[in-house]
Image (cartoon, rainbow, N blue to C red):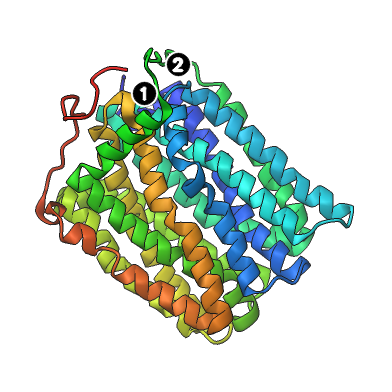
Amino acid sequence: MRRQPRLGLLHDHDYRQLFASTTVSQFGVHVTQLAIPLVAIVTLGAGPFEVGLLTALETLPFLLVGLPAGAWVDRMRRRSVLIAGDVGRAVLLLTIPLAWWQDVLTIWQLYAVGFLVGVLTVFFEVAYQSYLPHLVGRDNLVEGNAKLESMRAVAQVGGPALAGQLIRLLTAPVALLVDALAMGASALFVARIRKREPKPERRPDANLLREIGEGLRFVLGHRLLRAIAACTGSFNLFAGAYGAMLIIFLQRVVGADAGEIGLVFTITGSGGLLGAFLARRFAAWVGQGPAIWLSVAVSAPFGLLMPLVAAPGWRLWVAAAGGFVVSVGVVVYNVTQVSFRQGLTPDHLLGRMNATMRFLVWGTMPLGGLLGGVLGERLDVRSALLIGALGTCVAFLPVFLSPLRSMRTLPTQPDETRPGVPATT
C-alpha cells in the first residue's frame, strides 16, 4: 500500500472510510455510555445493584457467544458483519426514546436493549479487529491501530462533554437518538469501502466446536498471549466494578450534575489521545514488551484518587486528572498488545483469536459489573469504587512475570507451522 509522508494511511480511501466510521460511532458510543445509566438512575430511579446488573448484561454476551462468534466471523466477509452490527445497534437504541415518549419504558427494556446491543457488539468487535490486517497489511498495523486509537481518544474527549450537554438540554432518552444516528452513519461509511475480501473457503470437514477449539489452543497455548489475556482480563474485572459504580457515585454521592459528569469523562478520556500519540514512541524507547506492563503498572494507581472525592470542587478535578493518566496507560497498552496479536496470528485464525481474547478479557466485565453492584449494596458505592481501583493496580503482574518483562522486540509474523494449527482452511 502506498504511504504518504504526512497523511500515511489516511491517504488511502478505504482506510479513511474505516477511520470516519470509527469517528462517528465512537462519539455515539460515548453518548450511550453516559445516557443509558442516567436513564436508569434518573428516569427510572434504579439503585446500585440494578445499575451494576445493567452494566453486566451489556458485556455478558462476550461470555455467552464470544467463542462461537469468532468461528462464525472467520466464515463470513468481515465488512458485511460490521455493517449489520451498526444497523442493528441503531435500531435497538432507537427503541429507548420511543418507549420513553410512550411512557412505557422500564428497566427490563434497558436490560434487553443492553444485552442485545452487547451481542451485536461481540460480532462487530471481532470482525473489526480481524478486518484491519486485510485492509492495511501487517506492516502497517501499528500505524493503523494508533490512528484509530487517536480518533477513539478524540471521541473520549468530546463525546462525554457532548453527551452531558445533550442530556442536560434534551434529557437522557432523547440523547440516545444521537447514538442511533451515529451508528447508521458508521454503517454508511463502512459500505463505501471498495476493497472486497474474498469469501472465506469453508473446509469440507468444518466443525464449529473444533474451530472454537483451534482458537482456544492458539491463544492459551502461546505463553505471551496467555499472559496478555490474564493481565487484560483481571484489569477489566476490577475496571468493570469501578465503571459500574462511577456514574452513580458522581451523581448521588458527590452530587455532580450531568454536565459535570460529562466533563469528568471528557478529562479522563483525553488521556487516550496522548496515549495514542505516545504508544509507538514509548514502545521504541523502553521496548515493546516492557511497554505493555509498564503502561498499566505506572498509570493504574492514579485511579485511587476518585474514591477520595466528597463533593464537587477541586478534588473532583484532581481525580479526573488521575483518570487522564489511567487513560494514557490503557491506550499505550492497547495499541502495543493489539498490534502484536494481529501481527502474530495467521489470517485464517484472526477471527477466532480475537474472539477468544474477547471472551477471556471482556468476559470478566459482566462479573465486574455484578461485583460492583453487590459491593455497592452490601458496603457502599465509595467502597466499591475503591476496591475496583485497587484491583486494577495489580493487574500488570501476569505480563510482568512473563518473558514480556524484558522483550524489547516482539514477533510480528504469523507462525503457520505451530502444532495443532492447520496451515489452510
Q: Residue at x 56, y 71 (%)?
A: 373
Disc nearer the start of the sequence (1/2): 1
Q: Secondary structure at mark 1?
A: helix
Q: Residue at x 46, y 32 (%)?
A: 127
For this orientation, the residue located farthest to the bottom is 310
Q: Residue at x 36, y 53 (%)?
A: 331
**Residue 215 position in % (x across, y down):** 32, 35
Residue that carries the numbered disc 1 in the rendered image: 134
The quadrant of the rendering that contains the N terminus is top left
As drawn, 130 above or below 316: above
Amino acid residing under circle 1: His
Q: Is residue 313 left or right of residue 203?
A: right
Mark 2 Cα-neighbour bin, 10 Å: few <14, some 14–19, many ≥20: few
For this orientation, the residue located farthest to the right is 102
Is residue 45 something one can see in this rendering? yes
As drawn, 323 above or below 127: below
C-alpha separation, residue under disc 1 versus residue under disc 2:
9 Å
Q: Is residue 57 left or right of residue 200?
A: right
**Residue 67 position in % (x across, y down):** 43, 39
Q: Which mark is residue 195?
A: 2
Q: Are marks 1 and 2 in contact (CB under 8 Å)?
A: yes
